[in-house]
Amino acid sequence: MAKQIGTTAPRMDLGIQLRELRKTAGLTIEEASKSVSGLTYDKLRRVELGQSTFRMVGDLRKLLKAYGVEDNIGLVQALEELYKTPASQDWTTRFSSVHTSTRTLAGIESVARSVNIYFPNVIPGQLQTEEYARAHFTQVQPIEETTSEFINSNVALRMRRRELFLRDEEPGKLWAILGESALRHPIGGASVMRRQYNEILRMAALPNVTVQVLLTDAPVKRLWSNFSILDLGADRPTTVQVDSGLGGAVSMADRPAIVGRFTRWFNTMIASAQPPEETPAFVETLKREKT
């Protein structure tokens, strides 16, 4: 059984173990979903990805019966404990104004061992200053028709997510590839951008953080959507997150074929981006342009 880390990802742990049991039972998601009244393919898929849970513990028990493990009392009790972990114990619930998919991503990311990210058009949240993040959300507020509460909550969550890479004890590893346009795109004015550049320089100097810049004229095939690859350690599958382009909506998958595809894309862009040791000089040049 996967070791649960605190209470940040109980639904994810439950989903992983249910998927393993389903595969052992030789059932597809469609076949398994038919064993519980009211359970659909999409619902069970979200449960296995840790993005949703059952309405009642009885539904979980019926599914375990379909998987032929209802007599394994220890296993059943352990899975019921994961199911019963109160949502209030998940640290992301206090950011109630944030899209559910973004909160789910934040919860999963918080237990990651390492995170690889590619952002072609905007500086990623893991590297953002608070004022850059706020300026970014404020800039699109008239289009997205968001509230001040939504902005405040999203900014606070972004700052909280950064703690994984900034903590003193066993910080997570971050490898970020930024498109040149992400660094050049002005958000919040010259002073905001100068302080944002300083923050990138500060974080790039950390031993657990690597920052590369993919120049606009670099001769490489590239994706135009933000994506992240989250290494969750030996007990959990590596997960890919891709922005959908619809506000805060994100999609996640951990199928080996999908993880392999985005890993190949990331490695291709590592080879084509400027070496990490050239990042400070490039960012310093951009900072001087803002004076």
Image (spheres, rainbow, N blue to C red):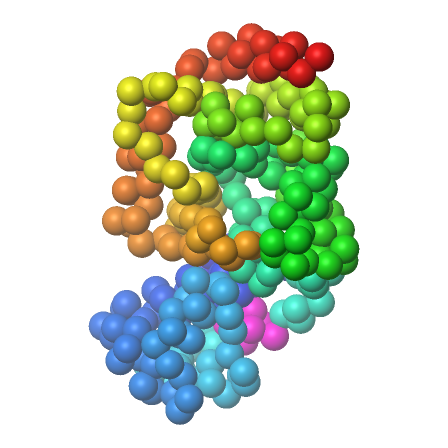
Q: Nearer the viewer, residue 208 or 266?
A: 266
Q: Is residue 289 above or below residue 111?
A: above
* On-image quarter of the N terminus: bottom left
The magenta stretch spans residue 80: yes
Is residue 165 visible to us here?
no
Drawn side of residue 116 relative to residue 203, left or right = left
The dominant secondary structure in magenta is helix
Residues drawn in magenta: 77-84
At 47% from the left edge and 77% from the top edge, which residue is drawn? 76
Q: Which residue is drawn at the image coordinates 66% and 53% (left, top)?
A: 142
* 78 magenta-colored: yes
Q: Residue at x 45, y 41 (%)?
A: 226
Q: Quadrant of residue 129?
A: top right
Above or below 118: residue 238: below
Q: Please provide percent x and percent y for residue 198.
A: 68, 19
Instruction: Tell me where residue 122 appears, x and y as whole percent.
Output: 54, 35
Q: Is residue 23 above or below residue 204?
A: below
Q: Does any portion of residue 183 appear in the rendered image?
A: yes
Asked if residue 194 lies left or right of residue 241, the reply is right
Residue 84, image quadrant:
bottom right
Residue 64 lies, in percent from the top left, at 40, 80
Q: Residue at x 29, y 20 (%)?
A: 219
Q: Nearer the viewer, residue 251 or 169?
A: 251
